[in-house]
Image (cartoon, rainbow, N blue to C red):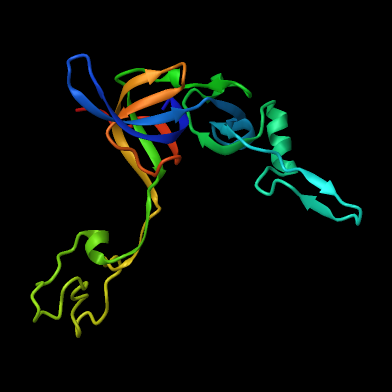
């Protein structure tokens, strides 16, 4: 993998191609990202590029007359984080991620990575945290079948049988049961980039991308090879 960038999900729309076909696309605000650190085999044991995305407020501490410290920006950066960003010569960032790139040695701290590293027609993989659905039953969570909906039926949307009583006398691991649904890391592979707006750092990707609006999405060069 030689190309990757961090983005936030703006939403979905549709555009027309030159041949007149209508294409549903997901709009992504891709970058600009800045390199905050370059990992090397000599110092860290592996090669990677650490990038930051979206500016973040610094933590401001004021002292009152009694000598107590009052934190104004509770969601800012601490001294250790600020020192890390100052060493790279960049402003404080909200998101920091590592990208294992084959050409990591070609990057330098404070270098910008913009959406123009991708071009129209490129195939990418999109990774994000999916939408949380809360506690859901087995029908919605795993697509299991329901029972008869007649009045005499005592079984409608219940899960059903979980296993035999005497042998093996237990429920197998991995059995689909009601529980928390969504809010997991999901990767959708081999998505096509339909359009690139280099001035506004926008990527228009064909189809859907995991996560809600404003979600952090990692866009990487696809690992799939077309047969």
At 19% from the left edge and 85% from the top edge, which residue is drawn? 166
The x and y percentages for residue 21 are 17, 21
In the image, what residue occupies the spot 19% across and 81% down?
Answer: 167
Q: Position of residue 118 (x, y in %)?
A: 39, 20
Residue 7 horizontal/vertical position (percent): 46, 32
Q: Quadrant of residue 193?
A: top left
Closer-to-camera residue (44/11): 11
Direction from residue 35 to residue 79 in the image, left or right: right
Q: Quadrant of the C terminus?
A: top left
Q: Which one is in front, 176 or 200?
A: 200
- Residue drawn at x 41%, y 27% is 1
In-image side of 11 versus 85 (left or right) = left
Against 93, is 200 above or below? Answer: above
Front one among 169 and 119? 119
User: Seen in the image, is 140 located left or right of residue 74?
Assistant: left
Q: How many marks?
A: 0
Extreme top residue here? 18
Between 122 and 9, the one nearer to me in the picture: 9
Whole-percent x, y for residue 91 in the image: 67, 30
């Amino acid at each position: 993998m030689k190309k990757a960038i961090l983005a936030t999900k703006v939403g979905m729309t549709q555009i027309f191609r030159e041949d007149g076909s209508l294409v549903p696309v997901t709009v992504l605000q891709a970058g600009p990202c800045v390199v905050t650190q370059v990992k090397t085999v000599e110092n860290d044991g592996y090669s990677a590029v650490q990038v930051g995305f979206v500016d973040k407020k610094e933590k401001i501490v004021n002292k009152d007359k009694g000598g107590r410290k009052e934190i104004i920006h509770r969601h800012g950066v601490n001294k250790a984080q600020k020192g890390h960003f100052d060493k790279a010569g960049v402003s404080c960032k909200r998101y920091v991620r590592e990208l294992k790139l084959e050409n990591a040695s070609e990057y330098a701290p404070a270098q910008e990575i913009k959406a123009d590293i991708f071009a129209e027609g490129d195939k990418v993989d999109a990774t994000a945290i999916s939408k949380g659905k809360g506690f859901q039953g087995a029908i919605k969570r795993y697509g299991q079948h329901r029972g008869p909906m007649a009045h005499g039926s005592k079984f409608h949307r219940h899960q059903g049988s979980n296993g035999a009583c005497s042998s093996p006398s237990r429920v197998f691991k991995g059995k689909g049961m009601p529980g928390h649904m969504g809010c997991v890391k999901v990767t959708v592979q081999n998505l096509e980039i339909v359009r690139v707006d280099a001035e506004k750092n926008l990527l228009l990707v064909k189809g859907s991308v995991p996560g809600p609006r404003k979600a952090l999405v990692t866009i990487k060069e696809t690992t799939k090879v077309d047969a």
